[in-house]
Image (cartoon, rainbow, N blue to C red):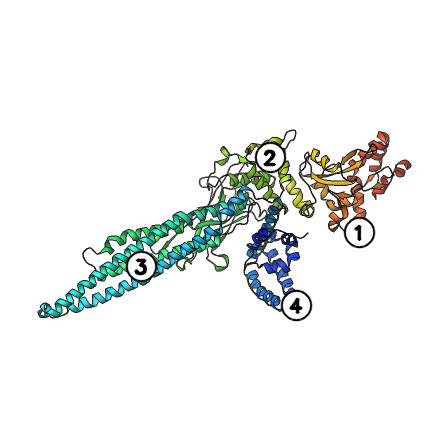
Amino acid sequence: MSQWKQIQQLQIKYQEQVGYLYDDNFPMDIRQVLSNYIESQDWDTAANHESMATVLLSNLLSQLDRQCSQEQNFLQRHNLKFIYQQLQTKCKASPLLMAGVISSCLREERRIISTASIQEQGPLEKSMQNSVAFERQKNMDNRVAVIRSSVQMMDQAVKYLEDMQDDFDFRYKTLQSRDPVDRNTEVMKQEVTRLQEMLNNLDFKRKENLSKMSDVIKEIDALIVSQLNPELMEWKRRQQINCIGGPLLTGLDQLQNWFTLTAQSLFQMKRQLDKLGELILKVTYESDPIPLQRPQMEEQVKYLIYHLIKSSFVVEKQPCMPTHPQKPLIIKTGVQFTTKVRLLVKLPEVDYQLKVKTIFDKNRQFFILTTTTKVMDVEESSNGCLSVEFRHLGPVSVTEELHSLSFEAQFNIQGINIDLETCSFPLVVISNVSQLPGGWASVMWYNLLTDEPRNLGFFASPQRASWGQLSEVLSWQFSTFAGRGLNREQLCMLGEKLMGTVQASQNECQVSWSKFCKENIHGKNFSFWMWLDSILELIKKHLLPIWNDNCIMGFVSKETERARLKDKEPGTFLLRFSESHLGGITFTWVEQSDSGEAKFISVEPYTKSRLSALPFADIIRDYKVITDGEVPENPLKFLYPDIPKDEAFGRLYNSQQNKGKMSNILSQQNGRAIELVLRKHYGNVLLMLMEMLLRTPITTSREYSHNALLKL
């Protein structure tokens, strides 16, 4: 079943979550009408290769244009044409960005489908949803809007104050220009009295305006401290969780809007204070409130501007190698990586080229091979992003040692010197691709358990993770890399394998870093994470369609496997991952013995080396063993619980033209299963003949028949 059809069958609350993914950048109408094409393309890779993104998007536009011409409904045809025009512009302007949007949407759809199948969210995802609650955003929007309105009203108040002062100044200078002889007249006394009243009103208005400005400054200060900075910290925490496969990261554009509006208010207030400074050059008097209060208020505004802009300098995209876009924060020596920094304050005053310096591991052995300085060019299409590519080298032995990547810039705005600095989350450096699984385990563990941005000594004494947290992250790995997450039953089996039967049902049970990644599983020469990661690789490279069609039960113990199969029809089989081999999948089917009891037959696990030769669906289709009837038969009839084999795997079969080649290879690969049958029916003598047969050319599995063996 296609991914889009699965979404249409979800509960409304999950469909609404999908709805939030789509906007003007990538309308849901396109997702609907071109669902088959969209799901059949590799957008993850395209998001990191511009030429591929350009081709895929060009094909998408061609299909959309064709769809427009074929659409019979006038209104729908009109909407599609309008969308086509908008999309065409965006695809040409930034193909990588558009491919990334589509990739993110598809990945988040899979996560929502996975969540719906589990029917409950884990503690991390719940906390992430709470952090971006709609009501909190609405409150923030209202508060920023009120401040903007107050500041704009202050503009009018300052202008009114200037008009009052000009009127007073004019009358005062007119009075001074009068003949001294006329100053003691009654008219002159009345004029002096009127001037005093005007000065009193002017003093009152100055004090009133300064009081209002002080209140607005306090409100902005409170907004930054109590809401804006916490929202930024929450976004950074969500970014950490997103890095390890968590929910889609959103909210940065909203943050930029809040930061920009707040900065605009502060700069507007700074101009108002500058205006007050100009007014006292013309008119001042004893106990004038402006020279008494303005300097302190000006310092407060500059302080807030400085720290607001300083905190708005963030890493939008964490360092990532283009070859492994879904595993950020792992850098291989000698390989390019990309990262983006972004200034969340967008003002005309800062719309100029800003030089950003990159520093890798201050005072340590790594160095950037290319230039360490890049220019930030604020562009509307990228929302003010800076994309930077670097290459670094260095002698390194890979442990859990963490490294840092910092960004620095300096600029002056309206007389305020601002030193910008931000850093990526800690990086893991590897020197060989074989070290990637261990590096990714470190990235997951760190970002799961701490929100400290520069805790480079974390693995000197790593924290423990609760099974509730860890199981959620493990499910995300399958959702991200294999398209479908794990259900409760599968996670329970993993918990048993990692912690034992008793602890597996307890979400609060603590798991150590060593237990997860360092210690070997009892009786094996590999760790729990090495075993699980090898399964992820196997799915991604050889089993993806079967996994996403929910045909693989996967994580199930032999005891549970037998309990599931014992009462089923003969020939019922299930697929599970090997517990004894790294990256292996096996199948077990049930038969009925002569005594009427169920017997179970399993095959030697298929690993990547065997699956490289044949698709797994074809192996299941063409698998044969010798039976009592002397003719090789396929014992696999029903995928557990009772799905006919061809119904479950039929759409994944290769064409029949390859079947002869497949049978030839399968007849050799099936040796282990045939060996089991021969031992039962013919004994060791015929087994020796079987071994002779395997050394002769074989064209079809039918040559394993009893008659063929006797002819030898």
Which sits earlier in the primary sequence, circle 2 or circle 3? 3
The span from disc 4 to disc 2 (Cα, nearest Å) is 55 Å
Contact check, label 1 and label 2, Cβ < 8 Å: no
The span from disc 2 to disc 3 (Cα, nearest Å) is 63 Å
Q: Residues within 10 Å of mark 2 (few under 14, many from 20)?
A: some
User: Disc 4 or disc 1, which is closer to the eye?
Assistant: 4
Residue tagged by mark 2? 505
Residue 272's label in the rendered image is: 3
User: Disc 1 or disc 2, which is closer to the eye?
Assistant: 2
Q: Residues within 10 Å of mark 3 (few under 14, many from 20)?
A: many
Give coordinates of residue 57: x percent, y percent.
Answer: 61, 59
Element under label 4? Answer: loop
Residue tagged by mark 1? 657
What's under tag 2, amino acid-wise? Ser
Contact check, label 3 and label 1, Cβ < 8 Å: no
Give coordinates of residue 567: x percent, y percent.
Answer: 76, 37
Of all residues, the one furthest to the right in this rendering is: 711
- The answer to whether residue 243 is left or right of residue 174 is right
Residue tagged by mark 4? 72
Which sits earlier in the primary sequence, circle 4 or circle 2? 4
Element under label 3? Answer: helix
